Amino acid sequence: MKTTYYINFVCSENLNSADNIDYEVTVDRPYLPRENMTMGGIFMVVENSAYDVAKDEAKVYATCYYPRNKNSDPAGEVDVAGAQKTTYDVIARLSERYGLKGTYTSRNKTCKTVRTDPNDVAL
């Protein structure tokens, strides 16, 4: 089955942070992960996936906390730059060791934090 994995590598405290890195890779797999999965020895939580058995394809959305957890101090503070480096290392290892050819997006280059002025909101 053609399976596309969309992985959110969490590099800060926030799941939707602009500091996170998104990775997309498509592979043929005979099984479909449901609740969690391991990719290259890294644990990931599977959420909101879409399986189309008739088309023999699936979209798997997963979250990987490994970079954040590996780069947190005992007080729970996250070294964002360290977590991002860990993510790039993981992606490189997946590419080299397992031959996965995917694309990644650094959110902090493509996302801008925007604050809404309450006076600009039309009611």
Image: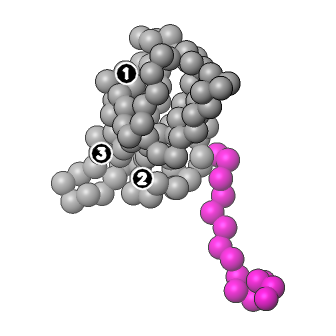
Nearest-to-viewer mark from 1 and 3 = 1
Residue at the image point whose x is 69% and y is 77% from the top: 116
- Count how many numbered circles sit on residues in the image: 3
Identify the mark at residue 40; answer none if there is no mark.
1
Q: Are marks 2 and 3 in contact (CB under 8 Å)?
A: no
Query: Marks 1/2: CA distance?
Result: 22 Å
Q: Is residue 121 magenta?
A: yes
Q: Residues within 10 Å of mark 1 (few under 14, many from 20)?
A: few
Specify the amino acid type for callout 1.
Gly
Q: Residues within 10 Å of mark 3 (few under 14, many from 20)?
A: some
In the picture shown, does residue 15 fall above or below 43? below
Query: Residue 2 occupies which quadrant of the picture?
Result: top right
Residue 87 x, y percent position in the rendering = 44, 34
Instruction: Please state which of residues 26 and 80 is positioned toward the viewer in this rendering.
Output: 26
Specify the amino acid type for callout 2.
Ser
Query: Marks 2/3: CA distance?
Result: 9 Å
Residue 94 x, y percent position in the rendering = 44, 19
- Left or right, residue 92 beside residue 1: left
Nearest-to-viewer mark from 1 and 2 = 1
* Boundaries of the magenta span: 109-123
- Left or right, residue 39 beside residue 116: left
Give the residue pinned by disc 3: 69
Say which element carries label 2.
loop
Specify the amino acid type for callout 3.
Asn
Q: Earlier in the sequence, mark 2 or mark 3?
A: 2
Residue 72 x, y percent position in the rendering = 28, 49
Furthest-front residue in view?
Answer: 54
Regarding residue 24, the answer to whether it shows in the image is: no
- Left or right, residue 3 beside residue 36: right
Give the residue pinned by disc 2: 12
Query: Marks 1/3: CA distance?
Result: 17 Å
